[in-house]
Amino acid sequence: MLARKVTSWMTRLLPFLVPAACSAAAVDDHRVVIYYQTTQLNNSATEHISLLPLIENEIAVTHVLVAAIHVMDASIHLNDYPPENPIFDQVWSDTAQLQAAGVTVMGMLGGAAQGSFTRLDGDDASFETNYAPLHDMIGTYNLQGLDLDVEEPMSLDGVIRLIDRLKADFGDDFIISLAPVASALTGGGNLSGFDYAELEAQRGSSISFYNGQFYYGWGDASSTSDYEAILDDGLPAEKVVMGMVTDPSNGSGYVDMDNEAPVLQELTEENPKFGGVAGWEYFNSQPGGSASPWEWATWMADHVRSAAATSGEKREISTTESAWRAVRKAGRRMRRHAKKVYRDYIA
């Protein structure tokens, strides 16, 4: 028991003990976000899927989101177990070392398993009871932010209360992101219950970015259109991260690397402050698959750097493609202006 306590203390202190010179944040100016839910190979208690290769060479990842946290009845779970379960000892050791190397480590709350946000959307007494273990987990494992993946009905007041409380308890530097399906960011299909445009209007200053889910039919990562539609509705590019599945087995809507490359090139060229990419999930990410899942972050980092930061020559584009880009760009400007006029003078 004493050995476990010492290990736990060292895990929490490690980010502060490693020399600052080791901090080497990754990608130049766009996020590369990795969701880390499958932590054990074939659910084995001993075969840990390590995050350390992400920092053993050139650091490409910017954010790792440990998933999925579930608020139970006045308790907390990480996937199927309490976060202090020994099965996660290596997880917390890895994340501390990532933090020491300059990578931001956050938690992801919610997801497909419903219940967490219902419990956090009750009256004040119920909120306090269910929020307490979440608060303690964030502090115990030195999480630097929380990604709210609300895939169940929640009230606008409820999500605002949660955001406000997290900021009050952990400070302005604590990162809050949300993970809506992409269509919810244009007023379309929405799993969360509340209106994201209204949330942004009321608490946009507290929300660092949105990890839009451009898969499962809620958005398409194989072209720029759905991403640009979100910008047309008024969200700035720096707050919109294009979320994608990293392997066909992780969900429908997978886009292979050859087809994703020109999409990312166009997005970064047209939007110098492009918010970046997010991958669901780490353990089997292409192109390396389960043998080398960290290669996804490296590949993405190479393809989302801004024009100023990219080394080497850019992919040449045909005259026809260049003309179509210009047409689409002019069309986007017209749509954005029309929508602004509607919001300001008609709606």
Image (cartoon, rainbow, N blue to C red):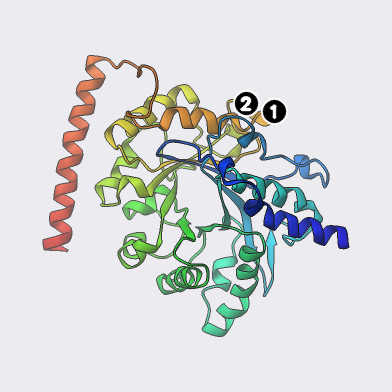
The kind of residue tagged 2 is Gly
Q: To which residue does mark 1 refer?
A: 291
Locate residue 86 relative to residue 228 in the image: left or right. right
Seen from this angle, which residue lies furthest bottom?
A: 125
Residue 28 visible in the shown view: yes
The kind of residue tagged 1 is Ala
Q: Residue 305: which quarter of the image?
A: top left
State the SS at label 2.
loop
State the SS at label 1.
helix
Residue that appears at 55% across and 57% down: 144
The total of numbered circles placed on residues is 2
Q: CA distance from mark 1 to mark 2?
A: 6 Å
What x and y, as percent, mark residue 57? Answer: 61, 29
Residue neighbourhood size for the residue with mark 2, other residues' Cα within 10 Å, grouped as few (<14), some (14–19), many (≥20): few
What x and y, as percent, mark residue 214? Answer: 44, 42
- Residue 288: mark in rendering: 2
What x and y, as percent, mark residue 122? Answer: 53, 78
Locate residue 60 relative to residue 74 in the image: left or right. left
Residue situated in front as seen by the camera: 169 or 32: 169
Decide: marks 1, 2 in contact (CB < 8 A)? yes
Residue that appears at 83% across and 44% down: 46
